[in-house]
Image (spheres, rainbow, N blue to C red):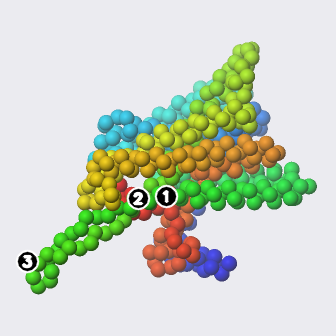
């Protein structure tokens, strides 16, 4: 405990770090306050009783979790930062397929990154306009808008407010990244997810008040799942490399050459290089059969047994398909973001090599084989994490609380917290203070060691 308070005092002593933390907390407070400001003319009580309330296992519920409840409240931050996330994913995927975006990402340096940022911002506005229009239509159809407000006024004002809210959230995220602690966009999502945690814990505590043993077991299980997730998110496979020997002249004799042993380093390959993206893509696919079942029921038809099972996230059919999709997308996304040829070219430029492996094509093939092998346990872990909330819910755990045992929420929270703590520790170590852990160094998502950080 003394160590903890000493670390807090050290953090407060560092003027720059203190300002960054206070700035971040201030921005997050503004964002959370904005989630309670409802759009003009909207009745929040009617929204809470209708479709937009959602539940944690459907698309509406997922968006509501990511926006910290703003989606179901029809607030000015109803769309949150999600349009920006969608735009970023689209631009990132274009970078793998379109030569122009590949050139911007890999060859044009700072100017290329600025162009990509500008394109992402413009695409965010376009996505917000489309999503905002659909969202306002759902609010209107639900009868949650005051009848005294003309439809065109509600439409125009709502589109402007929602677009402004998303752009302002995007601006806050960028400012937190520049002047605060951690990745601002990720922090905005994380604070929205964590906002629903106290309510979920309170609901679970109320339902288990007479079963104290089960409540303690749930908390212990949650801590264990988080601990395992932290370990595997940080897990890396180190590929040893060695720089070629250099020849230098001996002092006092320019004609005498002495060999100098090459330095050793390693390439850190993350076991889960794809992060949370496979789960997000798999969830997007899983919403398709569920949506088809809903349309079939709405038209008076009866959806088939398979489609019906896709609407229940606790069914074995749903979880088998979901698990397979996560494993497949983990391999696909890892193949997109980890380029063995780039590693091989970088080693060649640095006059480095992997012991026992020929430079060039053989090096790329070796790295590719290692990535393929370590992706298998990583993909299986992500698959198990993605379906774990369903198994937890089968034991009678509240659905809202069960969602924190795995899935997108857990991976995002763990990654963002590690990234933020790693930045705080870097400030402490840079000023000769003790780090946040007794031994070693914290590794956030950006805490890549060795030459991997330079690529």
Is 46 displayed left or right of 117 in the figure?
right
Of pointers 2 and 3, the one earlier in the residue sequence: 2
Whether pointer 3 and pointer 1 mark residues with C-beta atoms closer than 8 Å, the reply is: no
Number of marks in picture? 3
Q: Position of residue 15 (x, y in %)?
A: 49, 74
Placement of the N terminus among the 4 image quadrants: bottom right
Mark 1 to mark 2: distance in Å?
A: 9 Å
Where disc 2 sits, the SS reads strand
Characterize the local packing of mark 2: few (<14), some (14-19) or many (20 or more) Cα atoms within 10 angstroms: some
Which sits in the foreground, 38 or 124?
Answer: 124
* The disc label shown at residue 239, or none: 2
Placement of the C terminus among the 4 image quadrants: bottom left
* The disc label shown at residue 54, or none: none
Q: Is residue 29 above or below residue 120?
A: below
Characterize the local packing of mark 1: few (<14), some (14-19) or many (20 or more) Cα atoms within 10 angstroms: some
Residue at (57, 56) in percent of width and height: 232
User: Circle 1 is placed at which residue position?
Assistant: 236
Q: Is residue 209 above or below residue 11?
A: above
Q: Position of residue 110 (x, y in %)?
A: 31, 52
């Amino acid at each position: 405990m003394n160590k903890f308070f000493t670390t807090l005092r050290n953090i407060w002593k560092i003027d720059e770090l203190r300002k960054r933390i206070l700035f971040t907390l201030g921005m997050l407070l503004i964002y959370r306050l904005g989630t309670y400001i409802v759009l003009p003319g909207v009745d929040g009580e009617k929204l809470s009783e209708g479709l937009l309330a959602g539940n944690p296992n459907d698309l509406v519920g997922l968006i509501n979790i990511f926006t910290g409840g703003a989606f179901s409240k029809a607030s000015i931050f109803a769309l949150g930062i999600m349009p920006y996330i969608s735009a970023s994913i689209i631009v990132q995927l274009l970078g793998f397929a379109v030569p122009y975006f590949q050139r911007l990402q890999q060859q044009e340096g700072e100017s290329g990154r600025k162009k990509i940022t500008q394109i992402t911002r413009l695409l965010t506005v376009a996505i917000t306009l489309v999503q905002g229009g659909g969202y306002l239509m759902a609010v209107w159809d639900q009868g949650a808008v005051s009848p005294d407000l003309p439809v065109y006024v509600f439409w125009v004002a709502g589109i402007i407010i929602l677009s402004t809210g998303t752009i302002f959230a995007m601006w806050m995220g960028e400012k937190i990244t520049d002047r605060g602690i951690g990745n601002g966009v990720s922090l905005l999502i994380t604070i929205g997810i964590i906002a629903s945690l106290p309510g979920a814990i309170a609901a679970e505590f109320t339902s288990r008040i007479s079963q104290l043993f089960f409540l303690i077991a749930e908390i212990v299980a949650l801590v264990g799942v988080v601990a395992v997730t932290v370990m595997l998110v940080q897990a890396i496979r180190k590929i040893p490399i060695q720089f070629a020997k250099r020849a230098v002249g001996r002092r006092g004799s320019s004609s005498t050459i002495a060999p100098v042993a090459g330095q050793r380093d390693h390439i850190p390959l993350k076991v889960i290089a794809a992060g949370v993206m496979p789960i997000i893509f798999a969830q997007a696919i899983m919403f398709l059969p569920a949506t088809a079942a809903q349309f079939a029921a709405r038209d008076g038809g009866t959806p088939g047994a398979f489609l019906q099972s896709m609407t229940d996230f606790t069914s074995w059919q749903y979880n088998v398909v979901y698990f397979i999709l996560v494993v497949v997308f983990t391999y696909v996304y890892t193949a997109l973001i980890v380029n063995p040829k780039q590693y091989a070219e970088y080693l060649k430029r640095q006059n480095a090599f992997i012991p026992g492996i020929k430079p060039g094509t053989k090096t790329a093939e070796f790295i590719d084989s290692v990535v393929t092998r370590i992706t298998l346990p990583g993909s299986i872990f992500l698959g198990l994490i993605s379906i774990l909330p369903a198994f937890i819910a089968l034991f009678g755990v509240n659905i809202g609380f069960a969602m924190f045992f795995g899935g997108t929420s857990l991976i995002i929270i763990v990654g963002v917290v590690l990234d933020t703590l790693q930045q705080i520790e870097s400030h402490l170590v840079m000023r000769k203070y003790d780090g946040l852990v007794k031994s070693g160094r914290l590794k956030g998502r950006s805490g890549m060691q060795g030459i991997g950080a330079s690529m």
